[in-house]
Amino acid sequence: MLPFDGEKLQRLMHEDGMDVVLLTSRHNVTYATGGYYMPFFARGQRFGNGQYLSAVAIPAADLRSAFYVGRDSERDFTDAFGPLWITDLQWAGRRSNMTVGVAEKAAQILRGQGRATATIGVEFPFLPVDAFQVLRRDLPEATFVDATEVLGEVRAIKRPDELARLRAVHRVTGEAIRSALSRVRPDQTTRQLAAEVYRQIEAGGAAPLYALPNVGPGLRRAPSSERLGRGRPLQVDAGAEVEDYRSDVVRMGSVGAAPARALEMFASCADAQDRVRRTIGAGVACRDLWRLGSEALAATPSGQFGRFLAHGLGMVSHEPPEVEPDSNRILEAGMVVSIETEYRDADVGHVKLEDTVVVTETGCEGLGDVEREWCTAPDG
């Protein structure tokens, strides 16, 4: 059984005139294999004078003739993972830079399959230049096009197991931020706050990706030596990963009572997000969602400082669907949308709330809706 929607992939490839897609990014190789990526390089591809590279090639005419190319020492890892739906496993020899060997092997197999003149979709943003040079050298009659958008569309509708990972990582992230905010002291720095968020994410069983703190007044969102102080709005924008699926969560707090204006902005953020959530559902136009969120913030007393943003989220942040004012996209059940409502007022700070939902046939469901209220740490 294919771990993705094969018919959708074939349809999109045919629409874009692709005969084969050649996947080389960690996220798309993992997605296409059903969860496998060589564990030794799962958190970093740097190796020797270059990097690790693996590839999955999937022909549109016959998905079952797909093949995988990896490092020759991977056999134990693929065996331990369990049988892949891809039965043609090929290996490139160990060298300080894997990219050239993998590209040579992939080109050799494609030529052997009679696809030397094919239109091949590759991931231009994730394909090393030296590997691409080899592909063009060894397949001079082939045409290479960018498959990044097609692959994003294939991932846009999430399976139940993907949603389970997204629920888990958003819950861990929300709880981690809350735990960190609840124990801060005024003499601590934003760098220490970010480090505590990292520790709490790891304690929850996820891998931290980033923690961007802001302390108002001011709009800087970066760990620094700035003290948290008393009665200042604190924002933490954090992301984590569970089995390659990402979170994007923002929570607010303060040491002691927060300024009234910051609390008013935060209440408006929550209200605008609730209004957007009540609108989301299968069949809703993304441009209508963008307009509603933007208008909800603009209508508030601090509307001149407001900004609405929403984007897809899964293995990649800002993947489809795109929620833009000119978007023709219609939401479908199973799509995942991160909703950001915020104010950027230098005299107050960066006040924001961000959570993620999955679109359903009749509305939406929050993923990891935990600890969303303002967190007031004891002043003393």
Image: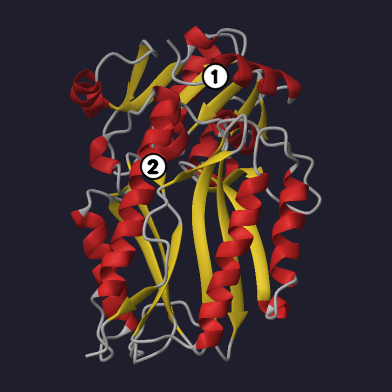
**Residue at the image point whose x is 36% and y is 84% from the top:** 224
Depth check: give the residue in front, 27 or 172: 172
Q: Position of residue 138 (x, y in %)?
A: 55, 26
What amino acid type is highlighted by mark number 2?
Arg
Residue 316's place in the image compared with 89, above or below, is below
Residue 50 visible in the displayed image:
no
Which labelled disc corresponds to residue 5?
1
In the rendered image of this protein, does residue 349 appear above or below residue 159? below
Residue 307 occupies quadrant: bottom right
Looking at the image, tell me whether mark 1 or mark 2 is earlier in sequence order. Answer: 1
Q: Nearer the viewer, residue 323 or 23?
A: 323
Query: Horizontal and vertical percent for residue 235?
Result: 43, 74
367 lies above or below 23: below
Q: Residue at x 47, y 34 (%)?
A: 28
**From the image, which quarter does the N terminus lie in?**
top left
Q: Compared with residue 349, is residue 39 higher up or lower down, i.e. above or below?
A: above
Closest to the observer, 48 or 319: 319
In which quadrant is the C terminus drawn? bottom left
Rendering coords of residue 186 (x, y %) = 28, 90
For disc 2, the marked residue is 167
Secondary-structure class at tag 1: loop
